[in-house]
Amino acid sequence: MAIVGLIAGTSLAAGPTEGDPSAPAAVPAGKSAESGTAEGGRAGSDADASAVIRCEGQVQRPRNSTHVPGTVNVVVTVSCSAPVPEITTRAALYKNGQLVNQSALRTQHNTRTAQNNAAVQCSPGNYRGRMYFKVVFPPGYQPPTSSTNGLGQEVALSC
C-alpha cells in the first residue's frame, strides 16, 4: 500500500501548483520535505498543531474483485484530520506497466474521507494502482488547494 499526503497548517508558504504533481513541496525552515507532501498555513494563526489539517491518500493493492467476479480492481482512499470542503479523487489501474482503466474524477463535499476505484476484466499479469487527489482546504488555510499523486505496489494476479 502506498501512502501520500497533503498538509495545510502552520506557515504561509505556498504548496505545489494545482495540476502539477511534480512541483516541489514548500517546507517551513527547519523541516525536511517528504515525497508527496505539501505544507501551508492558516492566515493569521500561530504555529499551533490544532491549525493543521493533514490529508493522507492510500493506494490499496490491486486484487481480484469479490463484488464483480472476473475483474481486478484497485481502491484509493483519502483521510483528512478534519473536515474539508472538497476532496477530489481519481483511481487508475495499470497492467504490465500500461494503463488499462481509470475512474472518472469523483468529488466529495464537506467530509474527512473520500474513495474511488478502477476495475478491468481480469487477465493474468502484474497490476499496479495509481491515485490522484486534490483537497480544497477551509477558508483561511494556505494553500487553499493542493494536489498530489501516488503509485501503489505492483502485484502479480492470475485470474
Image: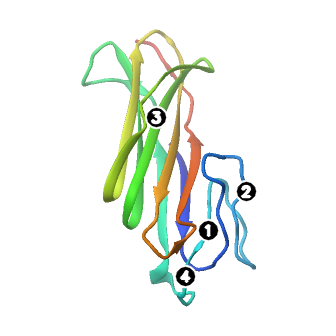
Contact between marks 1 and 4 (CB within 8 A): the answer is no
Numbered disc in front, either 4 or 3: 4
Mark 2 and mark 1: span between their CA atoms? 10 Å
Task: Give the label on residue 24, or none.
Answer: 2
Which mark sits nearer the N-terminus, 2 or 3?
Answer: 2
The structure residue drawn at horizontal position 32% and vertical position 12%, both measured from the top left corner, is 70
Instruction: Write down the residue under mark 1.
Output: 39
Name the one closer to the observer, 76 or 142: 142
Seen in the picture, residue 3 relative to 63 is either above or below; the reply is: below
Instruction: Write down the residue under mark 3.
Output: 91
Asked which secondary structure carries label 3, the reply is strand
The structure residue drawn at horizontal position 52% and vertical position 42%, both measured from the top left corner, is 132
Q: What amino acid type is highlighted by mark number 1? A: Glu
Q: What amino acid type is highlighted by mark number 3? A: Ala
- Residue 84 image position (x, y, % from top left): 38, 64
Task: Give the label on residue 43, or none.
Answer: 4
Residue 38 sits in which quadrant? bottom right
Q: What amino acid type is highlighted by mark number 4? A: Ala
Badge 4: residue crowd in 10 Å (few <14, some 14–19, many ≥20): some
Mark 2 and mark 3: span between their CA atoms? 22 Å
Seen in the picture, residue 39 relative to 133 is either above or below; the reply is: below
